[in-house]
């Protein structure tokens, strides 16, 4: 299984995938790591000897041109799956269609509850006692694609956005690896 991983930040989800591949518990090949800006995730790829690329939105005249450049760069690696591992950009419907049912995303809430960029904050504001993480396929909506896996995370009485998000991230790393592993072993 050939995977292109897209990141925007620290790359901890990427690192969990790389660690699982290195340990032999995930039968996949991370062929490239891409980003929308320079970030620690790109550094992690470089440190692991994996080809990396950055497609900066500001280098293009509009969002559509950026999407086409990103789409072509990803396609150049002929991936079986594209994993949005903390990739904080919404891509357009044309890019999604090019990799239909092959873009995997993580979200820090139990979808369909609390979609969008502030899932953890929204869950706390709503007063839920259980939230979690979702691994899903990307479609042309925002966090509306088919759910592949979910894991619950309790909300503690003393939680704030940071403490809750950190516990969700720990669960997210495990769930992402397990989900990719399941996809790799399915015929």
Image (tube, rainbow, N blue to C red):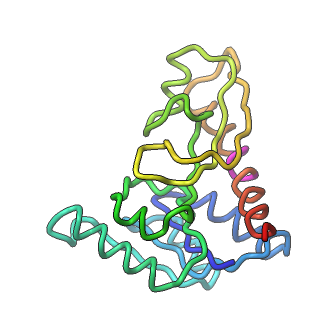
Q: Residue furthest left?
A: 61
Q: Is residue 135 above or below residue 26?
A: above
Where is residue 154, by image quadrant? top right
Residue beneath the point at 55% across and 24% down: 123
Q: Main secondary structure of the magenta part?
A: helix
Residue beneath the point at 58% across and 35% down: 111
Q: Residue furthest right?
A: 24
**Is residue 20 toward the left or the right of residue 131 in the image?**
right
Residue 112 image offset from top left, x and y in percent: 55, 33
Residue beneath the point at 53% across and 59% down: 84
Query: Does residue 14 belong to the magenta stretch?
Result: no
Where is residue 93, by image quadrant? bottom left
Quadrant housing the C terminus: bottom right
Q: Which residues are magenta?
A: 170-174
Residue 56 image offset from top left, x and y in percent: 30, 69
Q: Is residue 3 above or below residue 108?
A: below
- In this view, the residue in front, 112 or 106, is 112
Report the number of discs: 0
Q: Is residue 64 above or below residue 176?
A: below
């Amino acid at each position: 299984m050939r995977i292109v991983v897209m990141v925007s930040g620290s790359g901890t989800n990427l690192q969990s995938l790389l660690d699982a591949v290195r340990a032999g518990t995930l039968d996949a090949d991370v062929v490239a790591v891409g980003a929308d800006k320079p970030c620690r995730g790109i550094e992690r790829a470089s440190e692991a000897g994996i080809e990396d690329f950055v497609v900066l939105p500001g280098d293009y005249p509009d969002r559509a041109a950026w999407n086409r450049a990103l789409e072509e760069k990803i396609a150049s690696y002929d991936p079986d799956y594209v994993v949005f591992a903390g990739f904080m950009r919404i891509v357009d419907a044309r890019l999604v269609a090019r990799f239909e049912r092959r873009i995997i995303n993580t979200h820090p809430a139990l979808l369909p509850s609390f979609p969008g960029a502030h899932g953890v904050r929204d869950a706390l504001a709503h007063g839920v006692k259980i939230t979690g993480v979702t691994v899903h396929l990307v479609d042309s909506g925002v966090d509306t694609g088919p759910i592949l896996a979910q894991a619950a995370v309790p909300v503690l009485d003393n939680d704030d956005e940071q403490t809750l998000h950190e516990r969700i991230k720990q669960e997210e790393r495990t769930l992402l690896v397990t989900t990719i592993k399941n996809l790799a072993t399915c015929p």
